[in-house]
């Protein structure tokens, strides 16, 4: 690969950016493909106005109005395409029926609450910060012990775990920290004599009924099951002397998108010239979605826990001017956030419009 170098640049990306210039990373295939660094005299996000629908967007999921009694009705769709659906659900009581998703794997992220997850493979106790990976076709029932709020990612392709490559097999999280359900005798919902499994296929619901508890597995073996991973068991990769791309925080992968987890970590404290906040970049090949779970979101102002941001392909993003100034003094991040990078463009659903912060795109104006 031939590297060209014209005008004012840095030798090491993200380090020693010439005074008064702003570095933008323009790259293909996420952060893995051909790239160029452009050194501009103003940030690419310093727009004065935008016409048309393409813009950074954010949604306050804390404002979601939905049933907390019925699992299906509690799920609200925010973003989707043929590969994935991004939903949010609030569930206050145990499900009175079982559910099987025939359309895709489901990845739950527990934003609040705790309880039991009963499945074909046995039982898991869930808590805040858990990812729960439920493969397509698995029957399950959620029994919150506290009101539970979930980010739910439905994936048409199989969700798997990332290659660690040069980092070694135990990097990010040792596969041994993954937990799987434990078998125990499960009871049908109280007062129910005929158990219902609601099945979603092609977006349509059907129900199959049994005169007994359908979660009646007394043994299982194999390589496919339900997985649980808590964010406290993820050990983020960081570098003392240069800002690393977000892809180093990859937690799950599919053919069409990746899921990354941003966690508290030290910043680039070993070189005063190193950039400490994410560099400006164009999402040429990916739409980017971030769910803010906990902490202080160091590269974003005006974002709080329980919010979702959407940065579509075709328009740059990066830190706001206020965040740039504030973060020069920071030595650590305190944020926990889930990122979904989708190769194909996502559509914004009607429910998202209701809770949208319509002025989010203005937050880059100084
Ligand atoms: Fe990004």
Image (tube, rainbow, N blue to C red):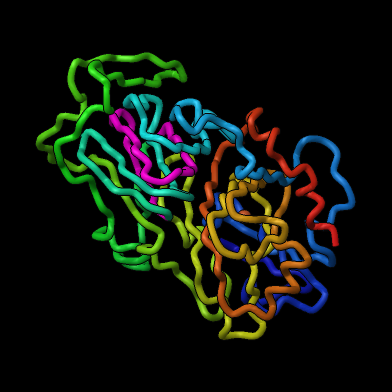
| Quadrant hosting ligand 1 | bottom right
Which percent across, then down, holds residue 310?
65, 45
**For this rendering, which residue is in front, 285 or 289?**
289
Report the residue at 59% width, 35% height from top: 79
Left or right: residue 169 compared with residue 252: left
* Residue 131 within the magenta-colored segment of the rendering: yes
The quarter of the picture where residue 211 lies is top left
* Residue 281 within the magenta-colored segment of the rendering: no
Q: Quadrant of the C terminus?
A: bottom right
Q: Quadrant of the N terminus?
A: bottom right
The residue segment tinted magenta is 129-157
Which percent across, then down, holds residue 254?
42, 42
Left or right: residue 61 compared with residue 90: right
Task: Report the predominant secondary structure element of the magenta stretch.
Answer: strand
**Where 71 falls versus 260 (above or below)?**
above
**Where 42 falls versus 83 (above or below)?**
below
**Where 327 falls versus 83 (above or below)?**
below
**For this rendering, which residue is in front, 146 or 227?**
146
Which percent across, then down, holds residue 259?
47, 49
Left or right: residue 10 compared with residue 100: right
Which percent across, then down, holds residue 204?
45, 16
Report the residue at 48% width, 50% height from top: 111
């Amino acid at each position: 690969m031939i590297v060209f170098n014209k005008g004012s640049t840095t030798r090491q990306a993200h380090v020693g950016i010439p005074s008064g210039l702003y570095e933008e990373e323009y790259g293909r295939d996420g952060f893995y493909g051909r790239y160029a660094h452009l050194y501009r005299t103003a940030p690419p996000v310093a727009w004065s106005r935008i016409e048309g629908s393409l813009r950074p967007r954010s949604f306050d999921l804390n404002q979601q109005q939905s049933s907390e009694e019925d699992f299906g009705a509690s799920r609200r769709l925010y973003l989707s395409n043929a590969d994935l659906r991004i939903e949010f659900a609030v569930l206050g009581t145990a499900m009175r029926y079982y559910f099987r998703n025939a359309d895709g794997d489901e990845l739950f992220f527990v934003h609040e609450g705790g309880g039991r997850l009963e499945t074909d493979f046995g039982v898991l106790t869930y808590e805040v910060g858990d990812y729960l990976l439920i493969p397509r076709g698995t029957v399950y029932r959620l029994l919150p012990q506290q009101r539970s709020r979930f980010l739910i990612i439905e994936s048409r392709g199989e969700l798997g775990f990332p290659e660690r490559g040069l980092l070694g097999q135990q990097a990010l999280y040792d596969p041994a920290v993954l937990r799987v359900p434990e078998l125990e005798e499960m009871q049908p919902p109280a007062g129910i004599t005929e158990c219902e499994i609601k099945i979603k296929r092609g977006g349509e619901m059907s129900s199959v009924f049994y005169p007994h508890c359908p979660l009646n597995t007394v043994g299982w073996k194999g390589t496919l099951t339900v997985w649980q991973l808590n964010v406290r068991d993820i050990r983020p990769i960081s570098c003392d002397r240069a800002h690393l791309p977000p892809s180093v925080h990859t937690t799950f992968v599919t053919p069409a998108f990746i899921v990354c987890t941003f966690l508290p970590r030290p910043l680039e404290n070993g070189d005063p010239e190193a950039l400490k906040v994410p560099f400006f970049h164009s999402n040429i090949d990916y739409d980017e979605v971030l769910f803010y779970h906990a902490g202080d979101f160091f590269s974003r102002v005006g974002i709080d826990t329980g919010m979702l941001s959407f940065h579509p392909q075709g328009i740059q993003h990066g830190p706001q001017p206020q965040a740039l100034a504030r973060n020069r003094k920071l030595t650590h991040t305190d944020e926990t956030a889930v990122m979904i990078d989708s190769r194909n463009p996502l559509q914004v659903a009607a429910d998202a419009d209701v809770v949208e912060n319509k002025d989010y795109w203005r937050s880059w104006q100084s």
